[in-house]
Amino acid sequence: MSPLQEDHHPMYRAVTRSIQVTVEPSFVEDESSPGDGRYVWAYRIEIVNLGIESVQLRSRFWRITDGIGRTEEVRGRGVVGKEPLLKPGESFEYTSGCPLTTPSGIMVGSYQMQTESGEMFVVDIPAFSLDMPNQARVFH
């Protein structure tokens, strides 16, 4: 594999109601211990408001499925301790992580957003694969 391909991380993107969510997952080798059944991924998320009204991120929901089909659901306020307000054209970026006990998995989720007038709506986070580098890909 050439260095260019090794450094390349896949990107996943979804747009819901003028809110664009881009996810870039990457395997964290330093924190993983395959011999102990611990595989860690980081994921960078960028949220861009492509619309004409300000929106605030209020909560998140994740469904995390490991390589053998075990599913965990995670809900919580905001992201990384924040509830960012995005004016038209603004973006917010953060990085988080996910440990699994298998060398592959998949994550999908959504954000609950609120308009200035108080209307709540759901924004999709695209499904993205967590695959250890140099492993055979498993399609979930």
Image (cartoon, helix red, strand yellow):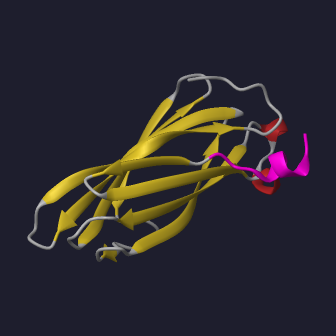
Stretch of the chain drawn in magenta: 1-10
> Residue 7: within the magenta?
yes
Occupied quadrant, residue 117:
bottom left
Q: Position of residue 73 (x, y in %)?
A: 41, 41
Total numbered labels placed on residues in the image = 0
Q: Residue furthest right?
A: 2
Name the residue rendered at 72%, 43% in the picture. Answer: 39
Residue 47 drawn above or below residue 10: below
Question: Quadrant of the image for the C terminus?
Answer: top right
Left or right of 61, for residue 68 = right
Name the residue rendered at 91%, 45% in the picture. Answer: 2
Name the residue rendered at 33%, 72% in the picture. Answer: 83
Q: Nearer the viewer, residue 59 or 20?
A: 20
Name the residue rendered at 20%, 71% in the picture. Answer: 53
Left or right of 32, for residue 14 = left
Residue 50 drawn above or below residue 74: below
Whether residue 15 is visible: yes
Q: Position of residue 20 (x, y in %)?
A: 39, 57
Q: Nearer the viewer, residue 116 or 109?
A: 116
Occupied quadrant, residue 37:
top right
Residue 58 drawn above or below residue 133: below
Whether residue 62 is visible: no
Occupied quadrant, residue 90:
bottom left
Q: Position of residue 29 (x, y in %)?
A: 80, 51
> Residue 35: within the magenta?
no
Left or right of 27, for residue 113 = left
